[in-house]
């Protein structure tokens, strides 16, 4: 059974940093591109970042470029999102999600339950 | 970036109704479009990919159509479990973008 479990969210002050983790199981992580998508309270979905199966290609939304870094450790079945210089507008539930079929088409069939990041003083 | 515009933003309907949601792209995405369903407090669920391909396990009352810049999601006969928010997502190019969502409410 495919499962993904995010962790690392919490309350952080503006300008602070957090590292989110996504532990994957039930599939071979290296076969699939992965992504982070966030959802601010009461708002819609916003794509944040994506990474290829091998990790050699990374992609970012303009809103986080230069502040967030996506990475993966396939040997540990884990995906990460390092978030620096956090702003109030980064407050959201952050989901990790798995590309559906390993074809490098970035649409997503399995999602984690999400982890809440709150940026506030 | 490709902008995705969904309409309507809210839709009131009754069980058994035929429901159509539209998603328009600011430039062509070919058929690289997915639809998701999200219920409160839950992660999104993939319904449709490549504009019209039904994800395994998704009821056949859901269907997708369109290409280029205009797409539709149709629910042929709305069921109680279908009251939720629906999002389109283009994966033609980075940055990936979602539509603003359509909330399907009970009339």
Image (cartoon, coloured by chain):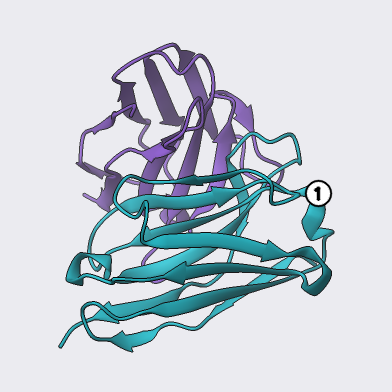
Chain purple in the figure, letter:
B
Q: Quadrant of residue B95?
A: top left
Q: Is residue B57 left or right of residue B91?
A: right
- Furthest residue to the front? A66
Q: Which residue is mark 1?
A: A31
State whether residue A72 is above or below residue B1: below
Secondary element type, mark 1: helix
Instruction: State left or right for residue B16 relative to residue A96.
Output: left
Looking at the image, which residue is at 23% across and 85% down? A13
Q: Residue placed at 59% from the left, 25% from the top?
A: B50
Instruction: Please state the total of marks drawn on the protein image.
Output: 1
Position of residue B79 measured from the top left corner of the image (x, y, whole percent) = 45, 48
Q: Quadrant of the N terminus of chain B?
A: top left
In the rendered view, does A9 fall on the left or right side of A43?
A: right
Out of A16 and A76, give the one closest to the viewer: A16
B93 or A27: which is nearer to us?
A: B93
Report which colour depicts chain A. cyan
Residue B11 visible in the displayed image: yes
Structural crowding at the residue carrying mark 1, measured as other residues with C-alpha within 10 Å and reported as few (<14), some (14–19) or many (≥20) = some
Residue A82 horizontal side relative to residue A98, left or right: left
Q: Nearer the viewer, residue A55 or B30?
A: A55
Q: Nearer the viewer, residue A27 or A50?
A: A50
Tell which subunit mark 1 falls on: A
Residue drawn 48% across the image and 72% down it: A114
Q: Position of residue A97 (x, y in %)?
A: 58, 57
In the image, residue B8 sits, relative to residue A111, either above or below, namely above
| Residue B16 visible to the viewer | no
- Please provide percent x and percent y for residue A84: 36, 71
Q: Position of residue B54 (x, y in %)?
A: 63, 33
Tell me where residue A24 sits by quadrant: bottom right
Q: Residue at x 63, y 27 (%)?
A: B53
Give the answer, above or below, for where B102 lies relative to B53: below
């Amino acid at each position: 059974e495919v499962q993904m479990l995010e962790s690392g969210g919490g309350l952080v002050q503006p300008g602070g940093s957090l590292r989110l983790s996504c532990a994957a199981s039930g599939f071979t992580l290296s076969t699939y591109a992965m992504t982070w998508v966030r959802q601010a309270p009461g708002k819609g979905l916003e794509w944040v970042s994506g990474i290829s199966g091998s990790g050699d290609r990374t992609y970012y939304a303009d809103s986080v470029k230069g502040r967030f870094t996506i990475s993966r450790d396939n040997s540990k079945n884990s995906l990460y999102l390092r978030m620096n210089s956090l702003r109030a507008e980064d407050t959201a539930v952050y989901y990790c999600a798995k590309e559906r079929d390993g074809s490098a088409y970035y649409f997503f069939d399995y999602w984690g339950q999400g982890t809440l990041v709150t940026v506030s003083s | 970036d490709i902008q995705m515009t969904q309409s309507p933003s809210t839709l009131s309907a009754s069980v058994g109704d035929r429901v159509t949601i539209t998603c328009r792209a600011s430039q062509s995405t070919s058929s690289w479009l997915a639809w998701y369903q999200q219920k409160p407090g839950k992660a999104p669920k993939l319904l449709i990919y490549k504009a019209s391909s039904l994800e395994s396990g998704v009821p056949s009352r859901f269907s997708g159509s369109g290409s280029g810049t205009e797409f539709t999601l149709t629910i042929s006969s709305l069921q109680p479990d279908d009251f939720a928010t629906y999002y389109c997502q283009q994966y033609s190019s980075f940055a990936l973008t979602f539509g603003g969502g359509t909330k399907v409410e009970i009339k």
